[in-house]
Structure formats: structure tokens, C-alpha cells
Image: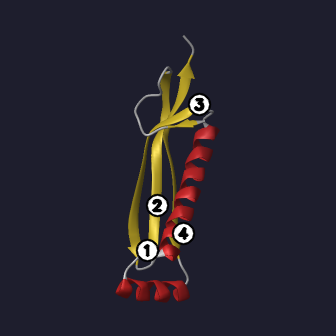
């Protein structure tokens, strides 16, 4: 499956199928949350949260791909990611795009 953040796929004529999306809400356990709080005092990358967000993007992306596969799509165009804080230490990742089918010419 081809996944792009543009509104076209070079060399392909496309038929729009549907909006597809995937999301997840993730948090870290209290111990890592406290340790990350200390990190904000001295500065630097907070790896516990970076790892959490990497995992969340991977899960959300997988869910979007599964939704597109159910439509028998050949690709997803206009892919966008968004994130929001649900509460302290918990974030939602949403990924969405347009599932497309390739048209033979």
C-alpha cells in the first residue's frame, strides 16, 4: 500500500474511496511520569515520552492501514497526523487520510 502526504501519487490515476483514520490514547506509568518531571528541571529530551509518542504513532498508523485494507484500497493520500493532550501525561494521536484505488488507463 502506498501512503503519501500529497493529494496525488505520481503516475497513478486515482478513484477516491473514503476517509480512513486510526487513533490511540497513550500514557506512561506514574514512575516514568515523575522521572520525566525531574528532566524538565535540567532540560533535554524526555525519552520516555518520545518513546510513548513513537509507539502511539505506530499503533494509529497500523489502525488506519487496516481500515484502508478493508476497503481494498491501493493507497492513502493526504495523510496527516495530529496530537492532543487528554490529561497530564496522556496524549491522543490521530492519523487520517483518503483511501484511493488505482484506475487502469
Tell which tag, 2 or 4, sits nearer the viewer.
4
Question: Which quarter of the picture shows residue 5?
Answer: top left
Secondary structure at badge 3 equals loop
Residue at left offset 62%, top offset 46%: 66
Q: Marks 3 and 4, Cα distance to the nearest angstrom?
A: 30 Å
Q: Which residue is mark 2?
A: 93
Q: State left or right for residue 79 relative to residue 68.
A: left
Residue 51: image tag: 4
In this view, 76 is above or below 34 = above
Quick one: label 2 or label 4, which is nearer the N terminus? 4
Q: Marks 1 and 4, Cα distance to the nearest angstrom?
A: 11 Å
Q: Residue furthest top?
A: 105
Residue at left offset 50%, top offset 74%: 47
Residues packed near mark 3 inside 10 Å, few (<14), some (14 to 19) or many (20 plus): some
Q: State left or right for residue 41 relative to residue 89.
A: left
Q: How is the image coloured?
A: secondary structure
Residues packed near mark 2 inside 10 Å, few (<14), some (14 to 19) or many (20 plus): many
Q: Marks 2 and 4, Cα distance to the nearest angstrom?
A: 13 Å
Q: Are marks 3 and 2 in contact (CB under 8 Å)?
A: no
Q: State left or right for residue 24 relative to residue 37.
A: right
Q: Which residue is mark 1?
A: 45
Q: Marks 3 and 2, Cα distance to the nearest angstrom?
A: 24 Å
Image position, residue 77 (x, y; %): 46, 36
Tell which tag, 3 or 4, sits nearer the viewer.
4
Closer to us: 1 or 15: 1
Tell which tag, 3 or 1, sits nearer the viewer.
1
Amino acid at each position: 500500500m502506498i501512503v503519501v502526504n500529497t493529494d496525488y501519487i505520481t503516475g497513478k490515476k486515482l478513484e477516491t474511496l473514503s476517509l480512513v483514520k486510526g487513533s490511540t490514547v497513550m500514557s506512561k506509568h506514574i514512575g516514568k511520569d515523575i522521572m520525566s518531571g525531574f528532566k524538565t528541571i535540567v532540560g533535554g529530551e524526555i525519552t520516555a515520552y518520545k518513546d510513548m509518542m513513537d509507539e502511539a504513532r505506530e499503533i494509529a498508523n497500523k489502525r488506519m492501514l487496516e481500515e484502508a485494507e478493508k476497503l481494498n484500497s491501493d493507497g492513502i493520500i493526504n495523510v496527516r497526523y495530529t496530537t492532543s493532550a487528554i490529561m497530564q501525561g496522556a496524549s491522543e494521536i490521530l492519523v487520517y487520510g483518503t483511501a484511493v484505488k488505482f484506475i487502469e488507463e
